[in-house]
Image (spheres, helix red, strand yellow):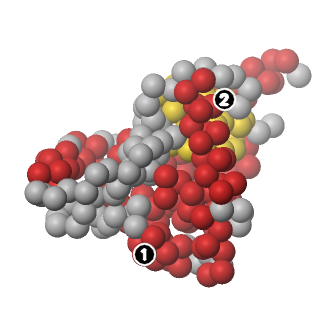
């Protein structure tokens, strides 16, 4: 038996980074008995206006100080401190690149997801930049000629469809996780133990019905 989950996530969300770390651990523990399908959610669907006076960058720096609290949690990601580079403009570019990477299989996709999260939160790089996304693509050892696929209009629609689906299921934020056969969403980066209990209950229920 495989317990299937849908995960709605944004690569600009620090809680999604922690969820990625924890769900990756669950994948390692349970192997093929669990399946996490990652779908898109757009916290910043539209590009930011240019920061002409530096105030937006300073505000963003102050916001990233809150990452320290998330870094102190159990099973957290590795968070850095933002310096002088411009913050990401919006959510769509990394989501489209991730959608393109997913076409090369789960292993490559997971590697690319890890590169996106660590590039943004650990190395403090602008993952809405095409140059940074290209670096992440190469670091994940994806085919060089496949990077241009991220600009395909069909991928934009797939990302938007994911986001719309999340909203229709009641997602008020991310990460949002639900069972594949149940539209009810659990919001937030939950502790590893909660995910384990969730999975074990599904296994136990399946055994009772056999």
Q: Residue 136: horizontal and vertical position, in percent?
A: 48, 72
User: For residue 131, which numbered disc appears in the image?
Assistant: 1
- Residue at the right extreme, as displayed: 210
The numbered mark, 2 or 1, whose residue comes first in the sequence reads 1
Q: Within the image, what quadrant is residue 168 found in? A: top right
* Residue that carries the numbered disc 2 in the rendered image: 179
Q: Which residue does the image show at 60% across and 23% down from the upper left?
A: 169
| Residue 95 in view | yes
Q: Nearer the viewer, residue 186 or 124?
A: 124
Q: Secondary structure at mark 2?
A: strand
Mark 2 and mark 1 residues within 8 Å of each other at the beta carbon: no
Q: Secondary structure at mark 1?
A: helix
In the depicted view, which residue is nearer to us: 3 or 64? 64
Write the residue at 65% across / 68% down: 149
**Residue, x 45% and y 62% (percent of image)?**
116
Q: Which mark is residue 33?
A: none
């Amino acid at each position: 038996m495989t317990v299937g989950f849908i995960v709605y996530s944004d690569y600009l969300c620090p809680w999604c980074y922690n969820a990625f770390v924890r769900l990756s651990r669950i994948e390692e523990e349970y192997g093929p008995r669990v399946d996490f399908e990652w779908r898109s959610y757009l916290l910043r669907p539209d590009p930011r206006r240019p920061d002409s006076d530096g105030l937006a960058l300073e505000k963003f720096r102050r916001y990233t100080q809150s990452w320290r609290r998330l870094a102190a949690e159990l099973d957290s990601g590795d968070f850095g401190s933002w310096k002088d580079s411009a913050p990401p403009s919006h959510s769509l570019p990394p989501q489209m690149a991730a959608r393109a990477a997913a076409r090369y299989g789960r292993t490559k996709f997971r590697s690319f997801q890890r590169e996106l999260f660590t590039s943004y939160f650990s190395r403090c790089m602008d993952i809405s930049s095409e140059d940074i996304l290209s670096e992440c693509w190469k670091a994940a050892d994806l085919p060089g000629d496949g990077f241009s696929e991220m600009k395909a209009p069909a991928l934009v629609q797939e990302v938007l469809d994911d986001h719309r689906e999340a909203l229709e299921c009641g997602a008020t934020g991310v990460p949002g996780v639900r069972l594949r056969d149940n539209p009810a969403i659990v919001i937030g980066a939950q502790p590893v133990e909660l995910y384990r209990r969730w999975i074990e209950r599904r296994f136990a229920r399946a055994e009772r019905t056999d």
